[in-house]
Image (spheres, rainbow, N blue to C red):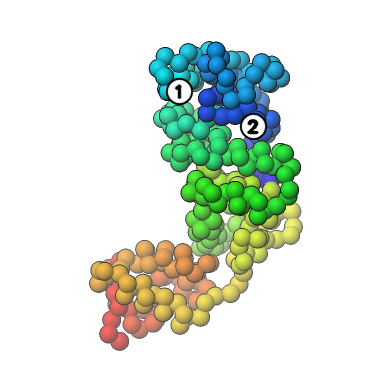
Amino acid sequence: MEEISSEISNKYAILIDSENVSAKYIESIFDELSRLGSITVRKIYGDWSKNNNGWDKDCLLSYSIQPVQQFSYTAGKNSTDSAMIIDAMDLLYTSNIDGFCLVTSDSDFTRLASRLREAGKQVIGMGERKTPKAFVSACTSFKILDSLVTEDLNKPASKNAMLEAAAVDESYITSIRDIKKTVYNIIDENDDKDKKTHMGEIGSRLVNKYPDFDVRNYGYSKLSTFLSEEFDDLDIDSGRQKFVSIKNHIDPKSAVKLRIVRLLTENSDTMYNMGLLNTELKNIIPGFSIKKYGYSKFSSFLKSFGCFEIVGDRVKLTDK
């Protein structure tokens, strides 16, 4: 998978909630984090007087992880939360850590992730696919361990198998539809500035907008393969730079007119905001841009049909 470049000198603290994540992911966790920098603090939290999801002595010694004992004072309550949060805040104020890796599937750490981000720290979340969206969104980026361990175990190389697994809990990852909207908007924005779109920019902006975005969640190992197979109308340069563009074809103007009329007639208000209308057209017509029809202003494009009236920043359908 193409990774966003990162300074190897970055220092990370990894804090593991043993009660919410299985030890079977340990190799995947450290392989993933080691790509971003060095792991200087390694702690795991749990009540070691009872079984903790396979986190045994040999596992902890192999990865030099410091166990932190936290007794369960109340039956049925996660005992690790407070200890893990206190240590994270201590590290924030007393160490030169550049980022934190919070390994948990528990939404109770959502506020902690937000607070660490507010302090300017990178927050890498790692958890199972069941992790609540609130915690995922609070992280700088989030890695779904189910996808990582599938890759590491070299299970039958099937995109279909991974997609079938994802389909069970598809609400926990960003939909392909939302990703497509964002990619088209990125390319269109750059076109408006007469600027080419680099594939690296697409990857970076997708992660910034969707912390859980990782092509491995959708059955791919490379961003370039993901874009070429999931998008029918993208051209990707074969050269080293890999610029991405929308194939040079446009809907007939008459077809666009029908789509606009439908949007206006389906709207309960008599007037429709032009900015919203433009966005809606981009969502339903991949790569839509008025420049392809020879116009620089959306209002001029609408007036050219002769059946739309412009009032300020709003438009309505006339009787013409």
Residue under the point 64% across and 32% down: 25
Provide the secondary structure element on which disc 2 rests: helix
Instruction: Find the distance from the CA under tag 1 to the CA under tag 2.
Output: 20 Å
Q: Nearer the viewer, residue 221 or 163?
A: 163
Q: Position of residue 214 (x, y in %)?
A: 60, 45
Q: Looking at the rendering, in which quadrant would you find the C terminus?
A: bottom left
Q: Earlier in the sequence, mark 1 or mark 2?
A: 2
Residue under the point 53% across and 67% down: 287
Q: Which residue is mark 1?
A: 78
Q: Is residue 273 visible?
A: yes
Residue under the point 41% across and 19% down: 75
Q: Position of residue 285 (x, y in %)?
A: 49, 69
Q: Is residue 310 visible?
A: no
- Badge 2: residue crowd in 10 Å (few <14, some 14–19, many ≥20): some
- Against 129, residue 257 (above or below) is below
- Badge 1: residue crowd in 10 Å (few <14, some 14–19, many ≥20): many
Q: Amino acid at mark 2?
A: Tyr
Q: Looking at the rendering, in which quadrant would you find the N terminus?
A: top right
Provide the secondary structure element on which disc 1 rests: loop
Q: How many marks?
A: 2
Q: Position of residue 20 (x, y in %)?
A: 52, 28
Q: Amino acid at mark 1?
A: Asn
Residue under the point 60% across and 37% down: 145
Q: Which residue is mark 2?
A: 25
Image marks 1 and 2: residues in contact by CB distance under 8 Å: no
- Numbered mark located on residue 116 in the image: none
Q: Quadrant of residue 245?
A: bottom right
- Against 119, residue 156 (above or below) is below
Q: Nearer the viewer, residue 56 or 270?
A: 56
